[in-house]
Amino acid sequence: MNAMPKVLVVDSGERAPDGALSVELAGMGYASVTTPFEAADDVLALIPSPAAVVLQMPRHADWSERKRFLDLARRLRKNLAESGTPVIITGGVNGAATMLQNELSVRAVAAPDL
């Protein structure tokens, strides 16, 4: 499993069984770690070079929670810009895997041949 690209999924900590992004990611060949918002920085420090970070904002988040996720996304994009790690915000499971797949496919196509 160490050879699999890893994706960090940050959520509010409230997880519904039908809201697991990890199943979709595994089907795409990614290992994932899901962590609540408050532990995101600590968990990110343990994953040396994630393939992506997905911020899974609750669908019915109020303005303060949305702002919290948007602020984290802004900070992570700045901190991860040099490595080219995409930071994706989603409002639920639907579409998150597709956005991630599209983002990583574009990066793979644009990467120079080694």
Image: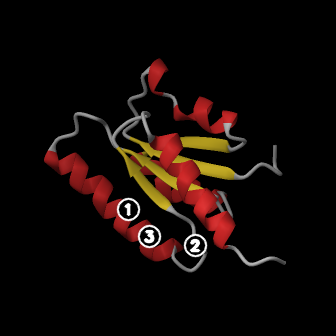
Helix, strand or loop for disc 3 = helix
Return the x and y of residue 62 as percentages of the image width and height: 16, 41
User: In the rendered image, which residue does mark 3 sit on?
Assistant: 77
Q: Where residue 3 sits: x, y (%)?
A: 83, 51
In the visual, does 87 lie left or right of 65?
right
| Residue 74 horizontal side relative to residue 100, left or right | left
Q: Residue at x 84, y 78 (%)?
A: 114
Q: Is tag 1's residue or tag 2's residue first in the polypeptide sequence?
A: 1
- Report the coloring of the rendering: secondary structure
Q: Dots 3 and 1: beta carbons under 8 Å?
A: yes
The residue nearer to you, when weighing 68 against 28, is 28
For disc 3, the neighbor class at 10 Å (few under 14, some 14 to 19, many from 20) is some
Identity of the residue drawn at 38% across and 30% down: 14
Q: Which residue is mark 1?
A: 73
Q: Position of residue 24 (x, y in %)?
A: 59, 33
Give residue 41's mark: none
